[in-house]
Image (tube, grey):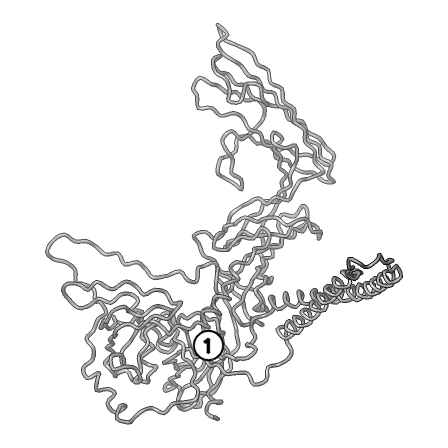
Amino acid sequence: MTAEVVNRWGSTLDSVVVYGQGAVCRRLARGCVPPGGTVRVTGLPRSMDPGPLRARVLDPPGVRVSEARVEVEAEPVGVPAPEGLRHEVERLTGEHAAARYRRDHLVHLIAEVGALRPVPPARRRDDPHRRTPVGAWLELADFVDERLAGLHTRLTEVEEVLRRAEHELDISVDKLARSSTDAPSAHVETTVSALLVIDASGAGAGGTEMELELEYAVPGAVWVPAYRLSYRQGDSSARLVMRASVAQRTGEDWTGVSVGLATADLRRGTELPKLRSIRIGRRQPATAPSGWREPPAGLADLFTGYDAAGPRPTTASRPLPVAAGPLLPPPPAPQAYGGPPVPPMDPGSYSPGSYAGHAPPARARTGAGPGSADRSFAAAPALMAPAGAPPPPPPLSSPSAGPPRPSGVELDYTDLVLSGPDEGSGRRGRLFPGSPFDPVATEHRRRAESVATLPLPGHAVRPRVSAGSFDHRFDTAARADIPSDGTWHTVTVGEIAVGLHTEYLCIPSVERTVYATSVLSNTTDQALLAGPVEVTVDDDFLLTAALPTLAPGGVRRVGLGPAEGIRVTRRTNVHESTAGLRNNITVLDHHIHVELANRLAGPVTVEVRERVPVSSETDVRIEERGEWTTPEYGIGPDHHVPGTRVRRVPLPAGGTAVLDGGYEIRMPAGKVLVGGNRRS
């Protein structure tokens, strides 16, 4: 018991990197290594991905982790605590059911009392007519009225109690739904730990105090960017505070952690494709090794001493090991295979189950040394897949000549499980792909992934949508607390300096309204993703707008709503006539008159936009009048369509301006404009 306590190391969550969906958590643990070098690091969540677990020794140098695997221990809780939201919901549910029963009982009594009617006795044929007992009828009516009055009074009180109980129950149910999932079950306490074997030969004997880190992936975490823009009128710069709305239901509360926000896809494969050339001729390149090796000689005699020792004694309870590989089905047919050379890696930094490693951790689980079975592995017939597991892949078509070529599932070394001596004679000492099916962990992960369906805040955009083909990462300036309750929580990322100037824009041919806009320029080397931005001008909240994606060095326009202090009017006049020697040319003369009035306290510059017709016909000529400018299409913060004309007008405080212009269309008399010649 003492050795077990010494070998258990507590861990603290230090940092989290949230991706588009999912997160990678980093835990730190510190302790003294026992002489055997085996420690158990606790604190891992139940919903962690079945992918590889990365372990690395931070201090002292020269120490490496030679084995890492995940184990799950479950034990019943002795006396469950009566406190908690779940107990409160159960109590209020009972009170609500009792109040509803009393209400239904009173309603039934009221119906019974209200149905009381005087029933005269049956009259025989020879009996004379009797007088109606009016007194008895009145006494019955008085009894019914008095009884109903008391029952209705009690019903009113019970309905009020039922209403309060239903209200309190709804509040408790909502609190329970929003509460953190970092809590043990009411009857079973589950402990997820990482079993590590530390090789401290390079740092001296056992008992050395060291610090190590664990890194693992969890589902059930999402984030969207948000911003707060503050500036003062007349300034050429602004303060843009980047924030993030983060929601997580990973099963553990993130308390005092450093949060990183990335737009990358956590489940996207990063393997480089292999481009194979096709040669014509007799000489062909050598065939790549298939990863197959002959089974080691004498594999059946490896367990002779174990069988001679007799049957193994049964144990009362044993922790359930969970492999760190992905949930994949077993192979459908027997294959014998080995592995290609392992890519080089840092022997003092990563365990065999790390993200970059490919060495099979299952060999180390049985305590076999580097020389056992000379690193040759074999697979036996497939197992029956459990209920709810994905269907097995189709059978492999063996080539006509040469050794068997196992599939990619069978070559996934991080997912191989070595069968122990208690397995059948055809399985012991052989490797099988696929980890044991764990329905409890699958249910935890399914509940964690429910945060992906949360409704987004207003103007929010998923980071994978707004980032496009590039990936970005943002780190928070301070540590944050994010509970595992599946609701949005806002954290501050940092402050970004952006260039800003206010412009006023109007298109009087579409709407007689002038709109205020802020032109933002990103002068940093970091992209700004699309999301909601709260605009504050002179310490007064203005509105919440949608900020578009702003690349480094990019310029975009953000609308601030109508500018009520600037008025615009527009009048048009169309005159149709003919020209030419035989009046064979139709002339449409359009006169445009625009008036602007500034009622603001300071000077402004208004950009007025108009549009002239564009024709591809060679016999149609369009002549313009006025000092209008043709913008460069596709350049700048706006996308202009062909035919757009722009004019920038400075307006002093209280000043007005008049813009006159127009265009003349000359076309053959037999042609007519689409929609009619007389239009504005």
Image quarter for residue 374?
Answer: bottom left
224 or 457, which is in the foreground? 457
Q: Residue furthest top?
A: 582
- Residue 224: percent from the left, percent from the top? 54, 57
Q: Is residue 518 left or right of residue 206?
A: right
508 or 97, which is in the foreground? 97
- Residue 90: percent from the left, percent from the top? 63, 73
Q: Which residue is mark 1?
A: 213
Q: Is residue 569 left or right of residue 226?
A: right
Type of amino acid at the residue the image marks with label 1:
Glu
Quadrant location of the C terminus? Answer: top right
| Placement of 280 over or under 388, stated as above or below | above
- Residue 275: percent from the left, percent from the top? 26, 56
Q: Residue at x 54, y 65 (%)?
A: 248
Q: Residue furthest left?
A: 282
- Residue 237: percent from the left, percent from the top? 62, 50
| Placement of 422 over or under 159, stated as above or below | below
Q: Is residue 181 left or right of residue 7?
A: right
119 or 327, which is in the foreground? 119
| Placement of 474 over or under 666, stated as above or below | below
Image quarter for residue 282?
Answer: bottom left
The total of numbered circles placed on residues is: 1
Q: Residue furthest front?
A: 126
- Label 1: few (<14), some or many (≥20) within 10 Å? many
| Placement of 137 over or under 209, stated as above or below | above
The local secondary structure at tag 1 comes to strand
Q: Residue at x 29, y 93 (%)?
A: 310
Q: Is residue 410 left or right of residue 217?
A: left
